[in-house]
Image (spheres, rainbow, N blue to C red):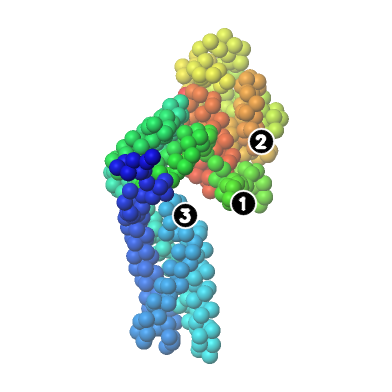
């Protein structure tokens, strides 16, 4: 017989109180700020276009019909809303997408102008100016807002309090992952056992008490605890389930729901197609131009090497390139002539953790001039000829000697599936300061998976900065 005095627990789906979803005020503030900014800049773009475009007396003239601006703003905002440019995440910073949205809005407005008044002359300069100004103003406005937001978040403002629940062996990696996002304040962590039936109520009470807006829970911590998602839902807390392995998904990956089951679709990271043809043409033209421009530098370095130490000017070494094919890499000689033979005696002093790469900060084989050339990566300049021969690219994973490749594990060979480069993500992320080959492989994989022409250009620009600062070089 049931005791009527005992209060029964509420339905799993029933919240303790009806409230707004946590963090909703911040989300509304974000949307309102973006919309106000967009309305102001679009209104300014239309006004300037009317002021400097060909005058025309029509429905669209603000002096005669100010209400026409509502149609203009409504059309533009409609495209921005449908494109998801007011949602959380990186979409609102998708400048290419913003350009497309403003282009479509301008085309629609032009069609409306023609259909509404087909007998009237349309001011093409007006619409052309508005199209260009709307793109420029929208992108500038978003950039300014993002920059201000970034600065505020760096000072601890506009951040979401988050709580992490995962297995202890993955806790450190999960915390590092969350802290890389410049919009979260970590308010608490707990192990997977915190969601066990005996501990669940206490954990959820702690999460609510800390004012948590979002929670990150590992799949291992949630998979055997049925209906736990409802507890977060009724508390108004956004729940993110961390994957089994904390590895980043490919940049082009998207989720699709098929019959209620989530499937991950992604574009394989293959350096093919028109982008890669452009990359090859860019590599050849830039390498040829650099060889012609810096030819006096080649001659000067060659003369100094001859004066500094006995031996040849160039050093050729067999490296492993695309698809594991060996080729000869050209460099200015920076070591004594018997450097390869001496390396076997120095293997015990290798400073890399796993021994795959050979790195030694005070390598006794390096000549006086060689030390200077290495600091500014001048010894790598002859590799421009490797680029001209198609054996290397300006940007890509660095080709390694046979000695290093022989120590590869099976998973390491993925880096050999793309053309090796003179510089790469490894070089601009620490160079010789990275002493763990697994970190090198992760950087190479990140480059392959996220490759684009813009990424290559970014790495080239960062390489110039790193070389001038002599960061991590020895």
Sequence-wise, which precedes: disc 1 or disc 3? 3
Q: From the viewer's perspective, is the residue at label 1 or at label 3 nearer?
A: 1
- Dots 2 and 3: beta carbons under 8 Å? no
Q: CA distance from mark 2 to mark 3?
A: 31 Å
Is residue 212 or residue 12 the one in the foreground? 12
- Relative side of 362 to 445, left or right: left
Q: Which quadrant of the structure image shows residue 197?
A: top left
Sequence-wise, which precedes: disc 1 or disc 2? 1
Q: Residues within 10 Å of mark 3 (few under 14, many from 20)?
A: some
* Residue found 64% across the figure and 33% down from its top: 414
Question: Residue at the bottom extreme?
Answer: 119
In this rendering, the answer to whether 4 lies above or below 312 is: below
Mark 3: secondary structure? helix
Mark 1: secondary structure? strand
Mark 2: secondary structure? helix
Query: Disc 2 designates what residue?
Result: 417
**Residue 280 - label:** none
Q: From the viewer's perspective, is the residue at label 2 or at label 3 nearer?
A: 3
Query: Disc 1 designates what residue?
Result: 258
* Residue found 40% across the figure and 44% down from its top: 231
Query: Disc 3 designates what residue?
Result: 91
Q: CA distance from mark 1 to mark 2?
A: 33 Å
Q: From the viewer's perspective, is the residue at label 1 or at label 2 nearer?
A: 1
Q: Residues within 10 Å of mark 2 (few under 14, many from 20)?
A: some
Is residue 147 visible from the viewing direction of this image?
no
* Residue found 53% across the figure and 34% down from its top: 244
């Amino acid at each position: 017989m049931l005791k009527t005095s005992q209060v029964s627990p509420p339905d799993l789906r029933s919240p303790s109180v009806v409230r707004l979803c946590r963090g909703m005020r911040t989300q509304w503030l974000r949307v309102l700020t973006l919309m106000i900014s967009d309305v102001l800049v679009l209104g300014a773009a239309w006004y300037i276009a009317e002021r400097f475009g060909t005058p025309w007396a029509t429905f669209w003239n603000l002096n005669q019909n100010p209400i026409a601006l509502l149609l203009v703003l409504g059309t533009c905002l409609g495209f921005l809303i449908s494109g998801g440019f007011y949602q959380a995440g990186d979409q609102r910073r998708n400048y290419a997408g913003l350009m497309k949205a403003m282009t479509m809005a301008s085309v629609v407005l032009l069609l409306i102008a023609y259909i509404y008044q087909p007998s009237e002359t349309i001011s093409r300069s007006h619409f052309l100016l508005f199209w260009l100004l709307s793109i420029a103003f929208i992108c500038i406005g978003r950039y300014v807002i993002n920059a201000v937001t970034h600065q505020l978040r760096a000072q601890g403002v506009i951040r979401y309090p988050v709580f992490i629940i995962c297995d202890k062996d993955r806790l450190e990696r999960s915390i590092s992952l969350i802290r890389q996002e410049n919009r979260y304040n970590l308010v608490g962590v707990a192990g997977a056992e915190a969601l066990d039936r005996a501990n669940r109520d206490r954990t959820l009470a702690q999460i609510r008490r800390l004012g948590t807006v979002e929670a990150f829970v590992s799949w291992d911590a949630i998979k055997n605890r049925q209906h736990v998602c409802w507890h977060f839902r009724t508390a108004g807390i956004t729940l993110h389930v961390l994957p089994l392995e904390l590895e980043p998904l490919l940049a082009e990956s998207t989720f699709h729901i098929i019959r209620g089951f989530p499937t991950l679709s992604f574009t394989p990271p293959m350096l093919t197609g028109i982008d890669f043809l452009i990359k090859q043409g860019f590599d050849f033209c830039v390498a040829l131009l650099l060889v012609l421009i810096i030819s006096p530098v080649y001659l000067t370095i060659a003369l100094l090497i001859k004066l500094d130490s006995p031996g040849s000017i160039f050093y050729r070494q067999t490296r492993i390139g695309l698809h594991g094919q060996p080729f000869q890499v050209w460099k200015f000689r920076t070591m004594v002539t018997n450097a390869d033979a001496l390396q076997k005696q120095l293997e015990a002093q290798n400073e890399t953790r796993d021994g795959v790469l050979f790195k030694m900060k005070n390598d006794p084989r390096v000549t006086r001039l060689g030390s200077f050339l290495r600091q500014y990566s001048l010894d790598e300049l002859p590799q421009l000829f490797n680029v001209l021969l198609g054996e290397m690219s300006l940007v890509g994973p660095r080709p390694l000697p046979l000695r290093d490749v022989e120590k590869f594990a099976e998973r390491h060979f993925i880096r050999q599936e793309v053309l090796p480069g003179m510089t790469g993500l490894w070089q601009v992320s620490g160079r010789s300061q990275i002493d763990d080959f697994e970190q090198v492989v992760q950087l190479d994989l990140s480059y392959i998976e996220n490759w684009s022409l813009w990424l290559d250009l970014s790495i080239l620009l960062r390489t110039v900065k790193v070389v001038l600062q002599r960061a991590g070089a020895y």
